Structure formats: C-alpha cells, structure tokens
Image: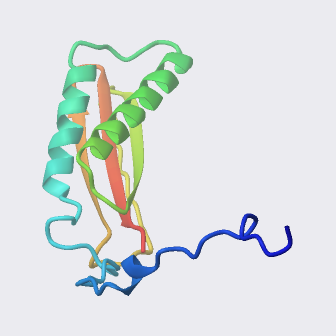
Amino acid sequence: MIGDDEGIPEEPDVSILEQKQDLTLVSTFQVKPTLEDKFKPQAARELIYSVLQETLSDKTYPAEPSEVKELVKSLAIKIKQRCREMDFAKYKIVVNVVMGEQRGAGVCSASRCFWDAETDTCASNTFLNDTIFCMAAIFAVYFY
C-alpha cells in the first residue's frame, strides 16, 4: 500500500552522539627524539664489538674474494638486525663494514656526513687477529 512504512528505515538512535565525552588530546608529533629514544653510540659500539668477536674470532682471512664478500655482507646484515632489536624508533640505520688481510700494511679510513648534529650520530669498532682486520660502523640518521 502506498501509506505503509515498510520500505522506510527507522530513524537511527543518535543519543550516543549527544553524550559529552571527556577527551584529552595529546600531541604525539615530535620533531626531535626524547632522551630515552636517542641513539646510544656506546651501546652500538658494544653491539659491533660482540658481533665481530662472535663471528671472526676463530676465522682466518679467506683466500677467495667471493668468501670475503659474503662474510662482509653477513656481518653488515647481522649488525643491522641486532641494532634494530635495540629499538631506536624513527632512526634510519646504515651499516658499513670494511675487511682486509692483516699483512702489516696500514689502513686509514674516514667518513663525512651531512646531518643534524643534535639527532644523528655514528658508532664504530674494529677487530684484529693474526690474519684479519675489520672495521664496522653504524650511522644512525633520525627520520623527521
């Protein structure tokens, strides 16, 4: 029938919307990390030291370049994973590993970065045995 209300939906109950709720708005946007969230270079140095010691202490320098490549790559991955486990939120982590054969020659390495000195930092450590020298560095860049 034309006068029926069968096809018309009921009015929704809006009483829940009319109730006042106490909401406290808190700004969660942070431009800079808090002191607790900042990258900790000393902890990163210790991490690098432990990974290099665990992995290289019983090794000799590989004869094949492909073995060196794989070893360096696995060290970088392991260091990055362990650094991620330390949960430095909003930091981009870059790991650089250099390895060479210990033959008495000197090696000098330097890095330069364009970054925010208040938030960005780096940590490095070295490993030496009779046949291997290895230097690993972690660069932590805060992502705004």
Q: Position of residue 52 (x, y in %)?
A: 25, 30
Locate residue 130: give its quadrant.
Answer: top left
Foreground pick, 117 / 87: 87
Looking at the image, residue 41 lies above or below residue 18: above
Foreground pick, 82 / 54: 82
Looking at the image, residue 23 lies above or below residue 130: below
Locate residue 58: give its quadrant.
Answer: top left
Observer able to see residue 106: no
Observer able to see residue 89: yes
Could you tell me which residue is drawn at 40 percent across and 30 percent down? Answer: 100
Q: Position of residue 47 (x, y in %)?
A: 20, 40
Q: Position of residue 56 (x, y in %)?
A: 27, 21
Relative to 93, 28 lies left or right:
left
Foreground pick, 38 / 18: 18
Foreground pick, 80 / 71: 80
Total numbered badges shown on the rendered structure? 0
Could you tell me which residue is drawn at 76 percent across and 70 percent down? Answer: 4
Relative to 26, 115 lies left or right:
right
Q: Quadrant of the C terminus?
A: bottom left
Could you tell me which residue is drawn at 36 percent across and 57 percent down? Answer: 139
Looking at the image, residue 27 lies above or below residue 125: below
Coloring applied to the structure: rainbow
Could you tell me which residue is drawn at 30 percent across and 31 percent down? Answer: 133
Looking at the image, residue 102 lies above or below residue 85: above
Q: Position of residue 114 (x, y in %)?
A: 44, 74
Q: Quadrant of the N terminus?
A: bottom right
